[in-house]
Image (tube, rainbow, N blue to C red):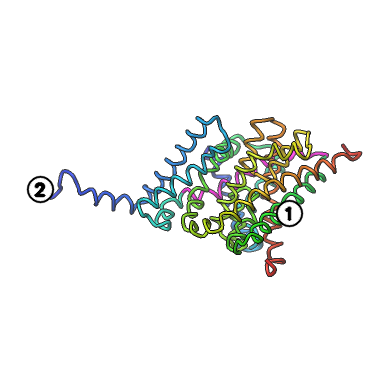
Amino acid sequence: MNTQTTPAFPNIHEIWVYLSGSPLLALVLTLGAYQLGVIVYERANRHPLANPVLIAIVLVAATITLIDMPYSKYFEGAQFVHFLLGTATVSLGVPIYKGLGAMRGRILPLLAALLAGGLTSIVSAVGTARLLGADSAIAGGFIAKSVTAPIAMGIAERIGVSPTLTAVFAVSTGILGAVLARYVLDLVRSREWWQRGFAIGVAAHGLGTSRAFSVNPEAGAYSSLAMGLHGVLGAVLIPMGFRILGPWF
Amino acid sequence: MMPGLVQILLFQGLGELVTHFFLPLIPGPVVGLMLLIGFLALRKSVNAPLDEVAMVFSRHFGLLFVPAAVGVVMFWPHLKAHAVAIGAALLVSVVLTVAATALVLKGLSRGPGK
């Protein structure tokens, strides 16, 4: 009988080493933080400022800083969640397909507005950041930030700017857009729901869309259509434009 | 749910292949997304398992970009140093983008078509 070889309570340090070496810690941290974010969001009556993704990012970032876990180590575990991003992007095809019917008879104005909005987003964000002294690493993160985050990160990879900054700027843009869009739309006297929804979707992708749905179903449908079209066209046009204009960037 | 997930993974794989061999500039999942739209347009309907999976993903999309966004910790000092520029760029561009899109829509749909 070798009862003495296994101590009843293994050293806490050993447990820690074991846990931080497996993907489990990063996964629990990521999913737990997100769940907490969702609870806060529900409690706050789905106010856009209580965004669950932002809460999760802050919580996870604070935690790994506190326990001195290098980001690369965290990502080793969290990559299993990250992988699904591509799969989820493909699944966006379903709502886009369903929304295409709403374009009938309005294709030209919608596409023209999308192009105008997309260009305005890139030029105004990169221009303002540059004017105020931001370097090209930061300014690069603004290029795809009005595109829905999963696609924006794919674009960022293709054009060689930081997917991380792009994701953070995309989420911030979504939150700002969800909060501010109604005031801007009132200011420019946009009255039709479909136009208001589409403008929110072009500027503030997913977060703007959920806001639009909570205000008016027609606005929500057009917002989600705008988000999808912006994603697809952005993924095609931004890398092409960047290849041509890149040297002047 | 499983048959839906299989369909989506299939299109994701197809997209990666097309990107790898023909369209290196476009992200693979976006090509997969376009192929999926093409498929749905041909079939003229969305099958139930596919619809179900798409719903699940769309509900928790945000969770999936947390791991990448947490990388912001590595940029922290850099971001703090440029906080004003970043804040201003976000604010200015959100306001201008919403305004530009709405104004173009308003201007173009006033014509005889609508």
Residues in magenta, as a range: A81-105
**Farthest residue toward the right?**
B112
Q: Secondary structure at mark 1?
A: helix
Q: Secondary structure at mark 2?
A: loop
Residue A8 point in image, percent of width and height: 16, 43
Pointers 1 and 2 in contact (C-beta within 8 Å): no
When asked about the image quadrant of residue A134, the answer is bottom right
Residue B78 point in image, percent of width and height: 52, 60
**Farthest residue toward the left?**
A1
Residue linked to disc 2: A4
Q: Earlier in the sequence, mark 1 or mark 2?
A: 2
Q: CA distance from mark 1 to mark 2?
A: 71 Å
Q: Is residue B95 above or below residue A139?
A: above
Horizontal relation, residue A15 to residue A91: left or right: left
Q: Could you tell me which chain the residue with mark 2 belongs to? A: A
Residue A235 point in image, percent of width and height: 66, 55
Of the pair A95 and B97, the residue shown nearer to us: B97
Residue A190 point in image, percent of width and height: 78, 37
Q: Main secondary structure of the magenta part?
A: helix
- Residue that appears at 46% across and 52% down: A79
Dot 1 and dot 2 within a common chain: yes
Which of pointers 1 and 2 indicates the residue nearer the eye? Answer: 1
Residue linked to disc 1: A119
